[in-house]
Image: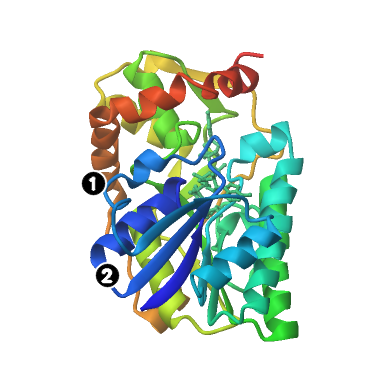
Amino acid sequence: MKNILVTGGAGFIGSNFLNYILTKRDDVNIVNLDKLTYAGNLENLSSIEKKKNYTFVKGDITNRELLDYIFTKYSIKHVINFAAESHVDRSILGSEVFTVSNVLGTNVLLEAAKNHQVERFVQISTDEVYGSLGPTGLFTENTPLSPNSPYSASKTAADMLAMAFNHTYGLPVVITRCSNNYGPYQFPEKLIPLMIINAMHDKKLPVYGDGLNVRDWIHVTDHNRAAELVWENGKVGEVYNIGASQEMTNIEIIKLIIKALGKTEALIEYVKDRPGHDKRYAIDSTKIERELGWKPEHKFEEAIQSTIEWYLNNKPWWGRIISGEYQDYYKKQYLS
Ligand code: NAD
Ligand code: TYD
């Protein structure tokens, strides 16, 4: 059995990872440590929560004593760190919590992993650490780090700490840098779920700037298969980009959602641009394809339709979210 600490497992990608791995394999014991911030939701894990090889601990990755207790009690030898504040717009409204959770949190986790001699530490990072591209070119693992938002700056600092722990102490670190994810359980403040839910309610669809910013979209299941491969077979000290080569402008996605839901483009509302808005992200994932044999399985045109259906069929899930704290955020971001 492999004893793994997964952090942030109640969030969008972490919960999809746990649902995926605990359904597929029985050679893992998993402890999920999650602070349950606004973005953490245990409902995402209802299908695996009763499994004997799964334990949930509510707590913060900045808590040294708690980490020591978990590493000792569960003989943790593997760490997969999904825990983070993850939303660029929130980082613009208030950056400090991003430094605390993403930088200090990763630092404390790295110390605990070093002290408990883990065999593998996977840092789940993002392509946003590379900054922004012009109309051509792709991010490779050798692209210089050049983050622009408080969010991406905090993720970059975490990556550099993880690499420093590998270089200085020989901690067996691997890093993944994935592009924009979509799929079930994504918190409704991110582009795709926000547009689906607003369109369903005939609410305005707020497009930042001219809507021509480009993101490279990957289905969350493809990201999670890649994370599993990097965890088991990735070379220590290496970075692996993950992307599905599916570039779309924001306005293209919004129009596609409108069409799928049978709504009108009159719902589109161009609003003031995000400060420092990165123009384009696009990933070269040749390395993980060549070295680890990974390939994305989901095509955007099909998987976006099943994602839209998921939101149509899971109204109670997002209905509970958008009636809570989310309202305050929405007012601050869009109505002030
Ligand atoms: P999310 O915001 O949906 O979930 C983050 C989870 O981490 C939540 O459950 C939250 O409660 C938990 N968390 C936050 N701070 C914590 C702390 N201090 N201690 C313990 N738990 C804490 O985010 P996501 O979209 O699932 O992203 C997961 C990871 O993947 C992040 O590290 C993010 O940077 C990275 N990533 C995300 C994307 C994307 O498109 N969403 C793309 C590439 C990389
Ligand atoms: P987002 O889902 O926040 O991901 P990220 O900023 O990490 O790429 O946003 C994706 C793109 O959609 C980004 O270019 C900003 C844009 N966007 C809007 O135009 N309107 C919105 O209301 C939101 C949330 C995002």
Residue drawn at x 30%, y 59% is: 20
Image location (x, y in percent) of residue 325 = 55, 23
Report which quarter residue 258 is drawn in.
Answer: top left
> What's under tag 1, amino acid-wise?
Glu
Give the number of marks.
2
How far from the left and from the top, in percent, is residue 100? Answer: 73, 49
Is residue 61 visible in the rendered image? The answer is yes
Query: In what element is the residue under mark 1?
Result: helix
Res 217 seen here: no
Q: Nearer the viewer, residue 138 or 83?
A: 83
Q: In the rendered image, which quarter is residue 51 located in?
A: bottom left
Beta carbon at label 1 within 8 Å of ligand 1: no
Q: Compare residues 254 and 37 and report the one nearer the observer.
A: 37
Image location of residue 97, percent across then percent down: 71, 42
**Which callout, 1 or 2, points at the residue further toward the start of the chain?**
2
The residue positioned 68% from the left and 39% from the top of the image is: 91
188 horizontally vs 90: left or right: left
Q: Which residue is mark 2?
A: 25
Q: x and y percent of residue 187 in the render? A: 45, 36
Ligand 1 within 8 Å of disc 2? The answer is no
Mark nearer the viewer, 1 or 2: 2
264 lies above or below 116: above
Q: In the structure shown, which secondary structural element does the residue marked by tag 2 occupy? A: loop
The C terminus lies in quadrant:
top right
Q: CA distance from mark 1 to mark 2?
A: 27 Å
- Disc sitting over residue 285 in the figure: none
Q: Nearer the viewer, residue 231 or 147?
A: 231
Residue that mark 1 sits on: 302
> Residue at the spot x=67%, y=53% of the render?
102
Residue 188 location, quadrant: top left
Dot 2 amino acid type: Arg
Could you classify mark 2 by the number of other residues whose Cα lies within 10 Å: few (under 14), some (14-19), or many (20 or more)? few
